[in-house]
Image: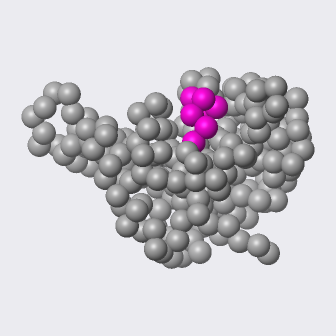
Amino acid sequence: FSKNCFVPMCVGGGVRDLDDVKRYLDLGADKVAINTQAIEQPELITKAAKRFGSQCVVVSIDVRKESSGVYRVYKNCGRHPTQWQPEELAQRVEGLGAGEILLTAVEKDGSLEGYDNKLNADVVKSVKIPVIVCGGAGKWKDFADATQMWRHELLAQNINQELRQEIDDAVQRCRDQLNLRGPDSDDPHDVVEPEEPLPVPAASGALGRRTRRAPDRFGSTALVTEATSAI
């Protein structure tokens, strides 16, 4: 897959030790997501960050809203509850060296009903590292509303070839909503895109092609699509 993918790729599933992280990076992944082991073996986050760089360490946090209204972190693909609340775990993994968080609202995942904006905003405000929010995107307005509330990445699932035009529309509408303009704009209130991309430091050869334009993260690079496979 990585041979035909020219955008940064995050891979996860079955990551239990540093060898698993290295294997995914050697296969061409730019980032590796850690879920259950981030809770059961938190030192893995620090070890991976020190060896490969924090920019490639993503901690995946699955959250369910309980009947009491309290948000709780679940592990093992969202099946088993833990003692963690999402903001607390987010702050902990940030301190351990994670470079990014993938936050999934389990009940919203696949619903196409819109993001859980309260959950996402609470977690985003609690940390300084980027947060990818996942679960519920069903129309372009969901992206635009979310990018106005917090400026982090948005993950869109259930994407197929027939929805390519909708993705393009979502990108453009997010840009319009945030007043993203080109470098020749003379409006001081506009967010101006840089003419040259800003490089992101790489810790291994697999990460060397990763670049980012800061304002673009609210346009095309703010939309992350997920591909899953059953083995």
Query: What is the quadrant of the N terminus in the image?
Result: bottom right
Residue extent of the magenta highlight: 115-121
Determine if the magenta segment contains residue 172: no
Q: Is residue 179 visible?
A: yes
Q: Residue at x 48, y 74 (%)?
A: 161
Q: Residue at x 46, y 53 (%)?
A: 139
Q: Is residue 31 visible?
A: no
Residue 145's image quarter? top left
Residue 169's image quarter? bottom left
Locate residue 18, reporting x and y percent: 79, 53
Q: How is the image coloured?
A: one colour
Give the number of marks: 0
Determine if the magenta segment contains residue 120: yes
Name above or below for residue 4 compared with residue 132.
Answer: below
Q: Nearer the viewer, residue 27 or 92?
A: 92
Residue 46's image quarter? top right
Locate residue 219, reporting x and y percent: 37, 49
Locate residue 131, reporting x and y percent: 57, 38
Query: What is the quadrant of the C terminus in the image?
Result: bottom right
Q: Nearer the viewer, residue 194 or 137?
A: 137
Q: Residue at x 71, y 71 (%)?
A: 229
Q: Nearer the viewer, residue 209 or 218?
A: 218
Residue 32 relative to residue 171: left or right = right
Q: Nearer the viewer, residue 217 or 45?
A: 217
Q: Residue at x 38, y 54 (%)?
A: 170
Magenta region's main secondary structure? helix
Residue 224 relative to residue 187: left or right = right
